[in-house]
Amino acid sequence: MDAYVGIDLGGTNIKVGLFSPEMRLVDQNLSRTEVEQGFDHVMEQIAGSVRATCDRNRVAGGGVRAVGIGCPGPVDVARGLMVVAPNFPGWRDLQVRDILAQKLGGVPTVLENDANVAAYAEFRMGAGRGLDSLVMVTLGTGIGGGIVIDGKIHRGATDTAGELGHVIVEVDGRPCGCGRRGCLEAYASATGTVARFREALGRGRPSALAAAGAVPDGITAKDIFEAAAAGDALAVETIDQTARYLAIGCDAIVNLIDPDIIVFTGGMTAAGDRLMGPVERYARERFFPRPRKHTRLALTELGGDAGIIGAGLCAQDLCETSAS
Amino acid sequence: MDAYVGIDLGGTNIKVGLFSPEMRLVDQNLSRTEVEQGFDHVMEQIAGSVRATCDRNRVAGGGVRAVGIGCPGPVDVARGLMVVAPNFPGWRDLQVRDILAQKLGGVPTVLENDANVAAYAEFRMGAGRGLDSLVMVTLGTGIGGGIVIDGKIHRGATDTAGELGHVIVEVDGRPCGCGRRGCLEAYASATGTVARFREALGRGRPSALAAAGAVPDGITAKDIFEAAAAGDALAVETIDQTARYLAIGCDAIVNLIDPDIIVFTGGMTAAGDRLMGPVERYARERFFPRPRKHTRLALTELGGDAGIIGAGLCAQDLCETSAS
């Protein structure tokens, strides 16, 4: 059979999806990235996983119409480069697209940012189906995003559009991993949420998660959500603040881009309505009247498959663009 | 001759531009809006100004191919409504487009937000010529904006994209005219700049603009810029803060939209490099590496004509869309 391949390259795992020409997910394969073994090794891991997935589904070499790969960090779409990525130490301006294409026998290959492909997947086949525009917010240890406008991925002039985590919410505020201060990510990511909770413990605030006066290591955002669900006052307050900051982020998205829907994904969305309920409430309070009525906030429908689906859709688009 | 008409509807003046089919500005006409005399009167003022401009240029009734009108405040482009606007008290969901078209003998007419048409003009014929995307920032008593992406006005799902003035820069910060707190406009507009200056005077800070301990009425942003140029320390500091906040606004634009260029217009840009120099410096410090190199910040090239030119271009597009 003919197929499209969508790849989600992460710091820990490589996920490969095999899609029918109609974009039905036929099979998927998970393998380790093993970044510590270097660029050549990772590229071979990716190619090996694609080959194995094709072989076991009897997709011959020529049967793969196109390959899409979603990569973390800023990417250079036109040249097919990973520019730099937090979990890939030392990687800088590496030619992922062409080397992968070569390893796979010259198949047409497209490289995109991973948040952009996830947004595109959600737009085409998930929570954004039938709409015109979507912004995806990825909530994990960091905060990222992807934007779809008029049905197309909006990359921006330098492929860096959608850096939602680095919108400033407090001038000269908390230090952020990016080296600046006051970014949304420094407050509302899992990391920022835990840091604010630990600071409150350090100021002597009591919590069921810590002995009096102690600031234990290893507290996670999940612990804080669970403590909040059990009624721990400091945990409730911490999550409430996270929700308020995320609402400010949604407000910036609406004031600048005004999409039909904002879709949340990533580890922190496991908290479900305990997080999204207050985010929605605070956001709607802030929105101007027309978006207050119109703009939808939703959780991902595709979850962890959005990366491979979006990469597969980009591969399909690549063929259709070349054909036309 | 055949012509396009572009109209810039403001709270004080109505500006009408008459354009050749090649979008050369042939003539323009300025008249008073006289909002206080009501909607019907304003519509007649607009139509009268268009007729007078056509007559004196020997453009017969049938010679006007299309009319574009840029209106303040949120608009409903699809239905041709002015939704609400600060300088038009009591106006709500008023049918501007169809009534104007009717008064002008049924000529094809398009209504757009005024900041959007100005952005479009600057994109097509001003500082954004030859680029793919542009964000315009209007700096006056308020802060507004217009966005052009891939050569098209980006209105957003509810026609409210580009509300740059209402991006939050300080959680629970200064009260804004919109009823919320911490909006960019509350800090960096002319109004916000004057308010911060007056507050500093009230705290006892000395300035050449006030007798010791006094907080005189009637200080304008222009006064503060002039005092800063003359070396007044408080004025220098106030303008510096304005620039820092505007840089944060530019940073939000770049992090979310990542345009090729950000163009500033409006009354405050009369200060020229005294404002734009520090805005540019602070913004570049903040930008991530790729936009730091790529993204241009510039002053308007079309100035006060951007409104009629953009409205004229929308009229031309309307004809071309209908023809194709």
Image (cartoon, coloured by chain):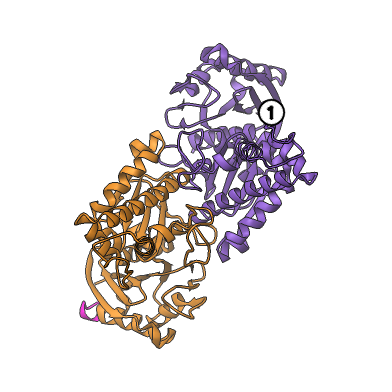
Chain colours: A purple, B orange
SS at mark 1 in the image: loop
* Nearer to the camera, A160 or B86: B86
Q: Residue at x 51, y 29 (%)?
A: A111
Q: Which residue is mark 1?
A: A218
- Residue B324 in sight in this render: no
Task: Check if residue B103 falls in the magenta segment.
Answer: no
Residue A171: percent from left, percent from top? 46, 47
Instruction: Please report, as a chain letter, where disc 1 is located.
Output: A
Q: Which residues are magenta?
A: B55-59
Q: Looking at the image, can residue A2 be seen?
A: yes
Answer few, some or many: residues within 10 Å of disc 1's Cα (few below 14, many 20 plus, some between 14 and 19): few
In the figure, residue B12 lies in which quadrant? bottom left
Q: Which residue is depicted at the point 73% across and 34% down?
A: A210
Residue A182 vertical position relative to residue A13 in the rendered view, above or below: below
**Camera-side residue of B278 and B29:** B278
Prevailing secondary structure of the magenta residues: loop
Question: x, y (%) of residue B287?
Answer: 40, 39
Which percent across, then down, holds residue B171?
53, 53
User: Does B209 sit left or right of A220 as displayed?
Assistant: left
Label 1 sits on what residue type?
A: Gly
Q: Is residue B27 above or below residue A2?
A: below
In the rendered structure, the answer to whether residue A32 lies left or right of residue B238 reads right
Give the quadrant of residue A52. Answer: top right
Name the quadrant of the N terminus of chain A: top right
Queried whether the magenta region covers residue B58, the answer comes back as yes
